[in-house]
Every structure is written in structure tokens, then in C-alpha cells.
Amino acid sequence: MRIALLGAGTVASGVVRVLQRNQDELCRRAGRGIEVVGVAARNATKARQAIGAEPPLSSDFHALATREDVDIVVELMGGIEPARELVLAAIRAGKHVVTANKALLALHGNEIFAAAQTHGVMVAFEAAVAGGIPIIKAVREGLAANRIEWVAGIINGTTNFILSSMREQGVDFETALQQAQRLGYAEADPGFDIDGVDAAHKITLLCALAFGVPVQFERAHVQGIRDLEIADIRYAEQLGYRIKLLGITRRSEEGIELRVHPTLIPAARLVANVEGAMNAVVVQGDAVGPTLFYGKGAGAEATASSVIADLVDITRLHTADPGHRVPHLAFQPGALADTPILPMSQVRTAYYLRIHVRDEAGVLAEITRILAEHGMSIDALLQRPSGESDAHTDVIVLTHQTLERRMDEALQRIQALDSVLAPVVRLRKEELR
Ligand code: NDP
Ligand code: HSE
């Protein structure tokens, strides 16, 4: 199989290295050799540093993506344009496509998969979610017997690396981010990592695969870790929780939840102990129960592992009748459901609140009264002792599950109390049972 790589950065370097190192083994698996016949890059010097001296370089991305002797185009540039146009051109030219570009698929996946369907080619994207973990294959094939109930995961290595460094080593946010960038984990625009956008791209793809719905990134609730304070990491710890940036998608009677936000999870859960750039995804199926997938979520060779698995899959399957291949989104294209994605106000979850209050009689009673009036039940309370000269303190409240709309209404009233001295910190909490 003749492969063209578009882009010659971190992931491309891993793909070239692993293909070279494991070529005999790969040939035994795939039934034929897999050879890189061209790499498109805009900066030849940088590209040579990444991919070495061997693969032929080109600066004409379009010509390489549509070249007659190329069987599979591997898009490793990132971003939307020109990646989208090049992927569509490759598909129209009858090439199979492998991509690690979750942003592209979360925004334009429906268009790209439809084009691939029309032209009878495969678009494989194992590397787009959770780096080296074969989670796409697991959800699409290994768990095909199940009615999937929910998926929750640590699916951004950069933010998990930052949260771990802050909690374990007391490293500040900026230093931890710079380390993640040096290690090749972060997106070209690290704002995508920190603000939860990258995790939202990935959970959007998992949502489509788990529930058989179109890709709907625009409906996802997205919140990152930029505003997370070390105080909340410490309070959560005192209450037996860790804070992780989770992507969550869950099916309920009303519709599908699709959200990314910092989340308290019990420290005893395996997933709470996933540290550094490691990723973990929990998938709850009705037949299998909970399953946990763990591994490197980013980095050159870990991601190359997924890209090359896709290359092997396509090599094995490319002569199969297109109607007999695994559907791109796990369900047959004509069988996708129109189940609505729920707005955040209709999501049910539990909460962590940090309320900075004047330390005087009756304050706690006022807060708990408002919560009770909005039908919320308290799970735990923590009040930090105020210092001798301090007239104010933090009250931490953990609630049981409630509707987000109810919490919004209660918080408006709590915030308006004279005794509340700062904006209330609200984080969501999931037990992941
Ligand atoms: P890099 O930035 O390291 O490499 C991107 C490559 O594409 C570089 O050669 C870059 O050129 C080139 N490129 C980018 N934009 C353009 C453009 N507009 N025109 C021409 N060339 C362009 O990215 P990564 O290898 O880290 O990521 C590649 C893809 O893989 C992304 O979609 C990313 O989200 C995804 N991914 C990355 C992971 C990781 O751990 N890094 C893990 C999983 C997925 P130049 O060097 O000149 O900028
Ligand atoms: N920037 C991404 C992360 C790369 O940190 O997880 C892997 O998709």
C-alpha cells in the first residue's frame, strides 16, 4: 500500500519511525508492505528534521493527495482548512483517508463521511480520540452488542498533565502548560486544550459512535480548566474527590447529554488516578457493564500506533465491497437517529459549590434553605475555620443530583445574599458508578 502523508510534524514523525521500525511485522499483519511514497510539508528543513532523510518530500499538498499511485492519504496537518479541502479532494480521487484531526471531524465529519460513502472509500480516525487508545474500534466493533448508556473520559492529555502537575507537584498553570507543549502533547493553539475544545471534539465523536447520531459539535457544552483554582483542587481532595477535565455523553429518556467540564470524581475510582498525559475512557454498556480503556492520549509514537492500526485495517479491507465494511459512525448511515442533544439546563448532575461568605450566625442556614427550596439535597458540607482576625470563610457544599436549571436558579439567589462576598464557584460532580 502506498501512503502519502500530509504534514510532517509530531505525529507524522512518529508514523514514519514506527512504520520503518516495525515494517516486517506490519507486513505479516497486513498481508503486504506499507510504504510512504511522499510527504507534503511547507517547510522542508523542519520536515527533514521530523521525518528523516528517506521519504520523498513535496510542497504541493493537493498534487500529492490526489496522485495516481497513492492508495491512502494520511492527513496529519490539523486545523480545518486546507485539511478539509485536501481530505475531500483525496476522497473524490478515490483515496482512502486516515486522519488524526478531531477538530476537522467534529465540525465537518458528516460531510466527509457522506463523501466517503459516495466514493466508496474509507475514512479512518482512530488517532483522533484518546491518542494511542483503540477506543474507536472498541466502541464501534468490540462493544457492538451493547446499548451504550454513557461514556465518560479523560480525553485531553495536556489538561490532565497540567492538573496532575498542579496537584502533585504544586507546579503553576503556565509552567505545566509549557512542559506539555515541549513534550508535543498540546494542540498548535493550546487554547483548544485548556478551554476544553479539544476534549469536546473528541467526546462529540464518541457520542456519535456510541448512540448512532450525527456528529454535532455545535450542541456540546464546553468548559475548560483556565479558571480552575488550586483551592478547589485541595478542597475536593479533603472531601475524597479529584478534579479531572471529563468529556461526558449520556443517554437519558429526554435525549443525549454532551458536555466537557472540570468534574469532581471520587478519588477511589480508577479513572480518578489517571495522571499526566495518560487518557482513560469509561464506557457503560447494558450487556458488558462498565469497561475502562487506559493509555497514552498524546505523543508522537502513541498516536502513530493508532494511525498505523488504521493503515493496517484499510490494507486488509480495501478490496472488500464497501457495503460490507464497518460503517464510519458504527451504525449504518441510513440508520442514524435524530435523538436530541439536551441543553445544559436539562442535564442532571451533582454539584460542588464553594461559597465565600461573611463568617456570621445564620449564613449557612440561609444557603441550605435556598437549596432546599429548589429541591436540592445536600450530600456533604465543609467549612474552613476562619482565622482569628478573619471575618470571612469558605463554605463548601456537595449536593446530590439535580437539574442544572434548578441549580442556576438557586445560585442566582445565593449570589444575591449580602453575606456572600465573591462569585460562587460551581463545579459538577459525577460518581461514575
Ligand atoms: P504539528 O503541528 O506537530 O504538525 C503539523 C504539520 O502540518 C506540520 O508539518 C505543519 O507545518 C503542517 N501544517 C499545519 N498547518 C498547515 C497548513 N495550513 N499548510 C501546510 N502545512 C501545514 O501537529 P501534530 O503532529 O501534533 O498534530 C497533527 C494532527 O494530529 C492534528 O490534527 C492533531 O490534533 C492530531 N493529534 C495530535 C496528537 C499529538 O499528540 N500531537 C495526538 C492525537 C491527534 P509547520 O511545521 O510548517 O507548521
Ligand atoms: N492536544 C491533545 C491532547 C493531543 O493533549 O490530548 C491528543 O489528541
Image (cartoon, rainbow, N blue to C red):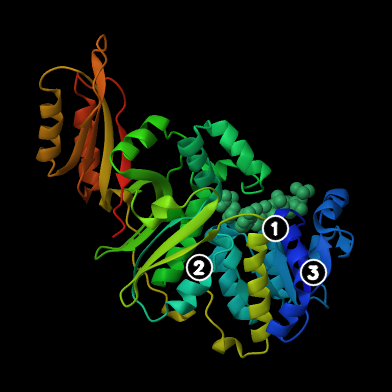
Q: Residue at x 68, y 83 (%)?
A: 29
| As drawn, 191 above or below 305 | above
Q: Percent x, y for residue 371?
A: 15, 37
Quadrant in which the N terminus appears: bottom right
For the residues marked 1 and 2, what is the alpha-carbon distance in whole angstroms?
A: 18 Å
Q: Earlier in the sequence, mark 1 or mark 2?
A: 1
Disc 2 designates what residue?
135
Amino acid of disc 1: Val
Label 1 CB sits under 8 Å from any ligand 1 atom: yes
The kind of residue on which mark 3 rests is: Gln
How far is disc 3 from disc 1 in space, using C-alphas?
14 Å
Residue placed at 19% from the left, 47% from the top? 400
Residue 248: x %, y % from top left = 39, 56
Residue at image mark 1: 11
Which class describes the residues within 10 Å of circle 2: few (<14), some (14-19), or many (20+)?
A: many
Q: Quadrant of residue 143?
A: bottom left
The alpha-carbon separation of the residues under discs 2 and 3 comes to: 25 Å
Residue 415 placed where, x, y %? 24, 27
User: Relative to 399, does residue 51 appear above or below in the rendering?
Assistant: below
- Say which residue appears at 38% left-offset and 60% top-offset: 249
